[in-house]
Amino acid sequence: MIKILTLLSFAASVTSSAFTLIITNPARYATNNVEIRIANNDCDNLGLSAQDVKDMVAISVGQYWNTVPSSKIRFHSGSFVDVAEDASLTDMKNSIEDNQIIIGCSKNSDLFDSANILAVGTMTVSAPARGIVAINNTAGSRFSSLSESNQRATLAHEMGHAIGIGHSTHEYALMYFVLSESIKQESLARDDSDAITFLYPNKSKVPFLLGSCGQIRDIADKDLWFNYIFVLSVLALFLMWFFVAGSFNEMQKPQRMKL
Amino acid sequence: MGLGNLVTDSGLYQKNRKGQKQNFEYAPYLSFHYRWEFSSRFEFTPELGFAFHKRPSPNHSRMTFMLLYPVSWRMWRRHYLRGGLANLVTRVAGKGGSVFMNNGNGVSLFARPSGATYSPAAAAFLGYEYRFREYLAVRFDTFLVPMLARPMRLAFSLSTNLYYF
Ligand SMILES: [Zn+2]
């Protein structure tokens, strides 16, 4: 039996410690690669199609939660799923499988009783984990008045709730409880990274030897120069070992430097 | 042993309201190592190190500890090139408890992190060392963490080392 947590909403209304969790020991996703299902209904009041939402989610995960090297969890924007256009959180949760997150628009008036609520994110209390992010698609919703970058930040913030992270008191953290035009949230803050690392740390494959090599993500990534440096390092290491091997042949007695 | 500064996740996270990224941080780094010379030009110097980050909040802490497996190559006189594999472990720990915080149009109870988690990552690194004396050196290492995976991050450390035999 899956229960839904108390609603965690992200309001644009102005109100103003570090990261918290939605509960002490939230359910964890049983996979390192979490699929995000997109509700297959257009967000007519926001001028967004389901495909637009899917594209926005893909950019958002790459910009925020997929950037933490000390966390094993990665997200990808997956296939569409049918839900009613006034779906409740329970309806949305029931439309996906375990260890998935659903993101989509809803006109549910109980859920969105104010135009100031931009979106809502939550997850199941106990395992198996399922995450739900509902975007306010009621008439007059302020979500459509946000800049594109703030829309992405809002989705990423709600996804934070959908994996068990609560609000933060660090004002430039993604999980800060107010979205403001004056505070940029274009990447995660250290506090957000601590939160996802705390909940989803890398697991060591060889304990205390080399640790995890993480997961290999989509090839279409922008950090290509990192790869460039990496290849150079491997080459340099190879050369060094080459010299080391060579030195064994003429194994000399260890001698101290003469300075 | 060595004393220095370790910078992790350089250029990855934002550090202020303007969205600027954090490229540098002060995190004292303390290390213990053993130097094994296996020829006049090559050494193996396994190392265990601890980096103490500034406490991120009163309720949680972060620490990095490292295992390094470097091979040093004496290029010329006092100049050494070093490189190898390393294991960086990030520790995030919290004291527990709960706190009321803004949540939409109201206030809700949130849980503070309780206990500690350890997150290991394999790294490749390259560095340069200058030996003032046989037992005193200064060095600079750059790390790529984690190896062979995305996203990668850059870390670097600068430290002064004392060697004992
Ligand atoms: Zn929130």
Image (cartoon, helix red, strand yellow):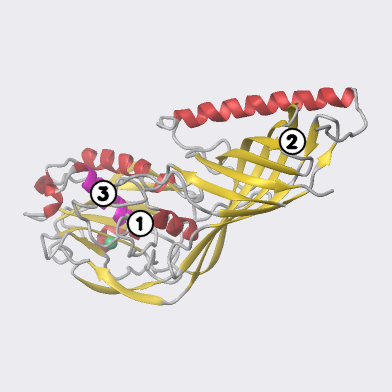
Report which residue position mark 3 lands on. A184
| Residue situated in front as seen by the camera: A201 or A6 | A201
Q: Secondary structure at mark 3?
A: loop
Residue farthest toward the right in the current orientation of the protein: A253
Q: Which range of residues does the magenta coloring cover?
A: A149-159
Report which residue position mark 2 lands on. B71
Mark 2 vs mark 1, foreground winner is: 2
Going 52% across and 55% down the picture, which residue do you hit? A201
Q: Secondary structure at mark 1?
A: helix
The image shows residue A23 at horizontal and vertical percentages of: 40, 71
The image shows residue A28 at horizontal and vertical percentages of: 46, 60
| Residue situated in front as seen by the camera: A134 or A241 | A241
Whether ligand 1 has any atom under 8 Å from the Cβ at mark 1 is answered as yes
The image shows residue B127 at horizontal and vertical percentages of: 64, 35
The chain to which mark 3 is attached is A
| Residue situated in front as seen by the camera: B75 or A8 | B75
**Count of number-bearing discs:** 3
Q: Quadrant of the C terminus of chain A?
A: top right
Q: Residues within 10 Å of mark 3 (few under 14, many from 20)?
A: many
